[in-house]
Amino acid sequence: MAQARRERHSDMKLEVDNVDLRYGAAIALRQVSLTAETGAVTCLLGRNGVGKTSLLRAIVGAHPIIRGTIRWNGEDITPLPTYERARRGIAWVPQGRDIFPLLSVRENLETGFAVLPRGQRRMPDEVFELFPVLKTMLRRRGGDLSGGQQQQLAIARALVTRPKLLVLDEPTEGIQPSIIKDIGRVIALLRSQGEMAILLVEQYFDFAQELAQTIVVMDRGEIVLSAPREELNEADVRRRLSV
């Protein structure tokens, strides 16, 4: 059964082709190209301010690009707004989590229903299997959770949408080590199921190295390294990540 699922989704991938993005006169991305395939983790590394978040915003439709093409599952989604990309199975967990602090945990999770057809608006059992702590906190307000619990809630909310592409922007930022390990296990499990592509932005090479099949390194709005994990020179990657 698992093998059949992998074969069914094996042709689904994200393709970013020669993308340029500006903020006013400032160039944030220059001719950026990458691919993220179903059943694998693609990790985007780089120092602060090199364009990693800008690239994710371009992919999910939160900021328009001025040149290039973004394709998902063979479809050109470049002109589509964020909600249409979400309806096509693209889920974004932004940096800083962006949960709703005054809504309960349950209500935060249910905001993921918005992009689903009415008949699919139910909570997947997997959400609480992956994040059991959330099941005990359904009535608590999101703002009352710890930073690590809020990060778990943000990922769980994305999973409620039943994504085929999961885009994660620095999920380990400001999180205690025990929850970083939990998040790593969740990402590894989702990867092993072979039903979604995962694009992960990180600053920590060790976390990326453990999870990713492909590692991409950015600097000054450009991709300077991209290769399967086992083919990269670790010292070179670490040098490019140092301040």
Image (cartoon, rainbow, N blue to C red):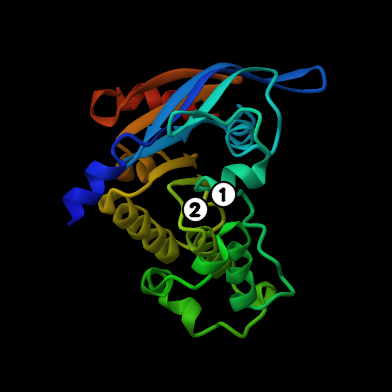
Q: Is residue 115 above or below residue 238?
A: below
Q: Which residue is mark 1?
A: 87
Picture residue at 41% right of the left edge, 36% below the top: 43
Q: Is 134 in front, or is 208?
A: 134
Q: Is residue 112 above or below residue 35?
A: below
Q: Position of residue 104 (x, y in %)?
A: 66, 78
Left or right, 77 with reference to 164: right
> Hey, which residue is sitting farthest right in the picture?
24
Asked whether the viewer can see residue 238, the reply is no
- Crowdedness of circle 1 by 10 Å Cα count: few (<14), some, many (20+)? some
Q: Is 42 in front, or is 78?
A: 78
Q: Position of residue 156 (x, y in %)?
A: 50, 64
Disc 2 is placed on an element classified as loop
Q: Is 182 in front, or is 236?
A: 182
Which numbered mark, 1 or 2, is in the foreground of this view?
1
Asked whether the viewer can see residue 112, the reply is yes
Q: Which residue is mark 2?
A: 172
Q: Inspect the image, locate mark 2, and give the three-letter code of the amino acid beneath it.
A: Thr
Q: Position of residue 44 (x, y in %)?
A: 46, 33
Left or right, 41 with reference to 134: left
Which quadrant is home to the N terminus? Answer: bottom left
Disc 1 is placed on an element classified as helix
Residue 204 circle label: none
In terms of sequence position, does the residue under pointer 1 or pointer 2 come before the other?
A: 1
Q: Quadrant of residue 63?
A: top right
Question: Given contact means CB atoms under 8 Å apart, are the residues at marks 1 and 2 in contact?
Answer: no
